[in-house]
Amino acid sequence: MKEKFIDKINLCLILISFILACLLPFELFLIGYAVLGPLHYLTETNWIVNKNYFVANNYWKYIVVVGALIYSIPYICSLSYVKSFFANEILEILTVKLSVYNNDIMFFIFITSFLFVFTNKNKALIISLLVTLMFSIFALKSDLYMLLNGVLLPTIIHVYIFTIFFMIYGFNKNKIGIVNIGLMILLPLSLFWIDTDVFNYHFSDFVKNTYTSNSFHYLNANLAKLFGVYKDLGFFFYEKIDLKIQIFISFAYMYHYLNWFSKTTIIGWHKQLTKRKSIGIALVWLTILCCYIYNYRLGLVMSVFLSVLHVMLEFPLNMITVKSLFKK
């Protein structure tokens, strides 16, 4: 009975997320990413930690923390407050040159998660290093390698594809659950027939500058290129296809966050929240939120480590979910 009630809530959340994404495609994303995003990172990370990271070897957590830290350094060093502490030569290494390896870091953590889910032997680390090195040498210049690891894996694959997988995995054989899964697939497809002119969009300079200055549009441009809309990376705020891509992105992110909080009683992630942890999470979340309010870029950089960390920590759970779906 509880599961059916949660499915009804999620049905409403899916519809609300899609309607708001249609009405406020860029605004909804920016607000959701700043407000719900950090709270999601913190609470899910705490839950995964209490589940022993879903891996057979606990040492894997140290690999993830180091990987997420290295991944975050270029973002942190891009802040004007931080730049003044370094010479130009060192700053170039910490930003431009180090960011080149972010794709490899993401891929390395992905491979290690796959191996550590099924084995606790240290040779898994060596295999991961060799596989990553091989791909770095032979596939580093590949557009597909860059697209999958650098763009899609931590974004659309994480917030949309695996959200659907989790919904299928937790499906409890009721009609509402089927409707929810169907809507997750059909609503984005319906964008092919929706005329965005009916919404009469007008985006403020603040919204446009915030979206582009934080490089969010890079995902839009890559999706447009992937769908064959543009030959190169192109992005325009008022083109119909770009608006539809943004509606999809906003919908995927918003429901991803809401879905996590809606299934609290199902997963029971709140049970691992002691009073001390709750206060700590609340303080960190409020601090990041204040940073977003003061300067959106500052908030983004302050939360980038938590964002990347929670994506990486979820890889083992993703593996287990996919394996279980094949068993079904």
Image (cartoon, rainbow, N blue to C red):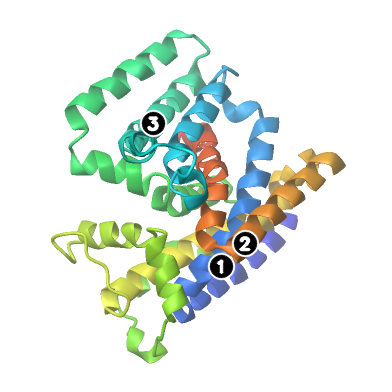
| Amino acid type, residue under disc 3 in the picture | Ile
Q: Does residue 174 appear in this view? A: no
- Number of numbered markers: 3
Judging from the image, what secondary structure is the residue with disc 3 in? helix
What is the x, y in percent for residue 316? Answer: 51, 31
Q: Nearer the viewer, residue 71 or 62?
A: 71
In the displayed structure image, the side of residue 91 where residue 31 appears, left or right: right
In the displayed structure image, the side of residue 216 where residue 311 appears, left or right: right
| Amino acid type, residue under disc 1 in the picture | Ile
Q: Are the residues flagged by discs 2 and 1 in contact, CB closer than 8 Å?
A: yes
Q: Residue at (54%, 41%) from the top-left corner?
A: 305
Q: Residue at (37%, 58%) from the top-left corner?
A: 215
Q: Where on the picture, by quarter, is residue 201? A: bottom left
Q: Residue at (56%, 22%) from the top-left corner?
A: 62
What is the x, y in percent for residue 66? Answer: 51, 27
Near mark 1 (Cα within 10 A), the count class, few <14, some 14-19 or many ≥20, is few
Query: Mark on residue 35?
Result: 2
Question: Where is mark 1, residue-wise?
Answer: 31
Q: Are the residues flagged by discs 3 and 1 in contact, CB closer than 8 Å?
A: no
Q: Where on the picture, by quarter, is residue 128? A: top left
Q: Where on the picture, by quarter, is residue 126? A: top left
Q: Please report whichever mark, 2 or 3, sits nearer to the chain's N-terminal start.
A: 2
In the displayed structure image, the side of residue 59 where residue 4 appears, left or right: right
Judging from the image, what secondary structure is the residue with disc 2 in? helix
In the displayed structure image, the side of residue 22 where residue 219 appears, left or right: left
Q: CA distance from mark 2 to mark 1?
A: 6 Å
Question: Where is mark 3, residue-wise?
Answer: 105
Near mark 3 (Cα within 10 A), the count class, few <14, some 14-19 or many ≥20, is many
What is the x, y in percent for residue 85? Answer: 49, 39
Q: Please report whichever mark, 3 or 1, sits nearer to the chain's N-terminal start.
A: 1
Q: CA distance from mark 3 to mark 1?
A: 28 Å
